[in-house]
Image (spheres, rainbow, N blue to C red):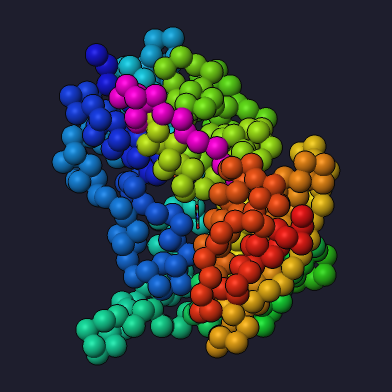
């Protein structure tokens, strides 16, 4: 029997390969990865630039050698350039030339890539996107931050507390990577100018949460340029300024955070159907429109549990979970890849920000609901217990059915994991009333007796 072939050796691809090999040790699985890194945590890249993570290697879950030990035929430096779904073959370009590989089943796990805004100057030195390990290394090197970490004398590293050679950096785009990178740059004493063409940063988190984050970013010294489209990155060899309709802002480097697009072209060229979002359309088992071809992770759509429509929210758990499910399916145990609620959390300096489901009325209306929303601010602990901080929750519901549709949250503590209660409620299809009646834990150091989620649901109900 021909092997299982996997294209892409990160979260989705390696989860599938590992699960498949565990369940079907006698079968062969071949993974083609065009880069040299495999099974790396791209989510940790901002923290590597910041210095919280010292080595890129620290971000790797399992090395290529460890996968080989598990019996997975992993070929780094190999790019799949074509798929023939009739012949069930892929065309591969590797270090020793081009060849054809047959497959029994194929998983496309080619991920996504960072988008660049359509402005002049993105090819200048000092202009970066951040989507892979090598990009993070290039950014640190450009900032002059590749010095070894300082030892604090206790045998433990005190982290990268060196000061950058760069004075000012532009972050173009206020998405979550842009906000995480603003913090990373600021850590090194760099003045950060964050440009966002919309009225608010962090669009998927909703305007209410974003407004709180923006105030905090400014308190931390980030210069915010909202409602400001970047027209050009200026410079001769390297970037020296950002040009907007308000004039020029001098900078020494720029990070483009304009979102991501699925690497769906390989599948599309093979005649595999893309969905309405532009990512590869899949069914509940990760099957594509072509027989014996599956897709998972940042290249693929997933079904949104709130709207019951295909959605594209490229996040790590979705990739790992779908990869693992497809690995099990291919090994003979049909397993659903699971729905998504778009649950995400982010650290912005001292704030935790989180979201799940539909976080504003416009999104809910667009999805066909009759939305109602509330924004409430409560404490993170009992009011008398020291250290209680404000948590702001915006909850959205459907007026007709009473169903809870989503929420965003922001605060200094107790936010990132608290959103998971709401996410669980969305998966269960709970109404706001159902949520308001949940038996959630209480002790003064951890929450008020009415947990903020209960309060928000009660007010919404
Ligand atoms: P990828 O990780 O993109 O891997 C795809 C692989 O396929 C790549 O290694 C690529 O080289 C390879 N490939 C592509 N085309 C080919 C080809 N033709 N032939 C061979 N190989 C090919 N998610 C979260 O949930 N939380 C976070 O906090 C978070 N933070 C992030 C921060 C940053 C800076 C970035 C960039 C991403 C972050 N993510 C986060 C997203 C998360 O990293 C992705 O969802 C996850 O990596 C997707 O895994 P994947 O396997 O689908 O794709």
Q: Which residues are magenta?
A: 327-341
| Of the pair 19 and 198, the residue shown nearer to us | 19
* Image coords of residue 76 (percent x, y): 29, 40
Q: How many marks?
A: 0
| Of the pair 405 and 56, the residue shown nearer to us | 405
Image quadrant containing the C terminus: bottom right
Q: Is residue 328 magenta?
A: yes
Residue at the (33%, 40%) spot, across then down? 14
Residue at the (53%, 34%) spot, across then down? 300
- Can residue 321 be seen in this snapshot? yes
- Can residue 410 be seen in this snapshot? no
**Dividing the picture into quarters, in which one does residue 67 lie?**
top left
Q: Is residue 368 left or right of residue 118?
A: right
Residue at the (63%, 69%) spot, across then down? 450
| Above or below 266: residue 384 | below
Image quadrant containing the N terminus: top left
Residue at the (27%, 21%) spot, across then down? 3
| Above or below 457: residue 266 | above
| Above or below 305: residue 173 | below
């Amino acid at each position: 029997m021909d092997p299982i072939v996997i294209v892409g050796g990160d979260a989705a691809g390696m989860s599938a390969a590992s699960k498949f090999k565990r369940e079907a040790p006698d079968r062969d699985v071949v993974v083609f990865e065009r880069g040299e890194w495999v099974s790396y945590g791209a989510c940790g890249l901002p923290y590597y630039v910041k210095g919280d993570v010292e080595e890129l290697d620290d971000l790797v879950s399992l090395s290529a050698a460890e996968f080989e030990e598990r019996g997975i035929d992993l070929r780094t430096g190999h790019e799949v350039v074509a798929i023939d779904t009739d012949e069930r073959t892929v065309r591969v370009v590797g270090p020793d030339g081009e060849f054809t590989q047959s497959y029994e089943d194929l998983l496309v796990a080619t991920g996504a890539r960072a988008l660049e805004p359509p402005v002049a100057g993105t090819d200048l030195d000092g202009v970066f996107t951040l989507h892979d390990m090598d990009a993070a290394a290039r950014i640190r090197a450009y900032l002059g931050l590749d010095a070894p970490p300082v030892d604090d004398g206790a045998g433990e590293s005190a982290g990268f507390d060196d000061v950058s050679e760069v004075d000012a950096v532009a972050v173009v785009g206020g998405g979550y990577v842009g906000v995480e990178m603003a913090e990373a740059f600021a850590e090194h004493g760099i003045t950060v100018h964050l440009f966002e063409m919309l009225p608010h940063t962090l669009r998927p988190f909703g305007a209410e949460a974003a407004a709180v984050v923006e105030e905090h970013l400014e308190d931390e010294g980030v210069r915010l340029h909202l409602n400001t489209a970047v027209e050009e990155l200026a410079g001769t060899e390297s970037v020296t300024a950002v040009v907007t309709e308000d004039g020029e802002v001098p900078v020494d480097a720029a990070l483009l955070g304009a979102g991501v697009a699925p690497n769906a072209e390989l599948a599309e060229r093979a005649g595999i159907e893309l969905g309405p979002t532009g990512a590869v359309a899949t069914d509940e088992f990760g099957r594509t429109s072509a027989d014996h071809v599956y897709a998972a992770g940042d290249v693929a759509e997933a079904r949104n549990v709130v709207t019951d429509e295909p959605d594209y929210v490229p996040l790590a758990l979705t990739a790992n979970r779908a990869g693992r499910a497809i690995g099990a399916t291919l090994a003979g145990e049909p397993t659903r890849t699971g729905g998504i609620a778009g649950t995400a959390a982010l650290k912005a300096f001292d704030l935790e920000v989180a979201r799940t489901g539909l976080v504003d009325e416009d999104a809910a209306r667009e999805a066909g609901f009759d939305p109602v929303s509330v924004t409430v601010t409560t404490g993170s602990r009992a009011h008398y217990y020291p250290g209680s901080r404000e948590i702001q929750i915006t909850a959205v519901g459907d007026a007709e059915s009473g169903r809870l549709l989503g929420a965003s949250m922001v605060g200094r503590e107790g936010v990132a994991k608290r959103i998971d209660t709401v996410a669980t409620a969305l998966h269960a299809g709970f109404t706001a009333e159902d949520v308001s009646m949940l038996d959630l834990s209480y002790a003064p150091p951890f929450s008020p007796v009415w947990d903020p989620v209960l309060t928000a649901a009660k007010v919404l109900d």
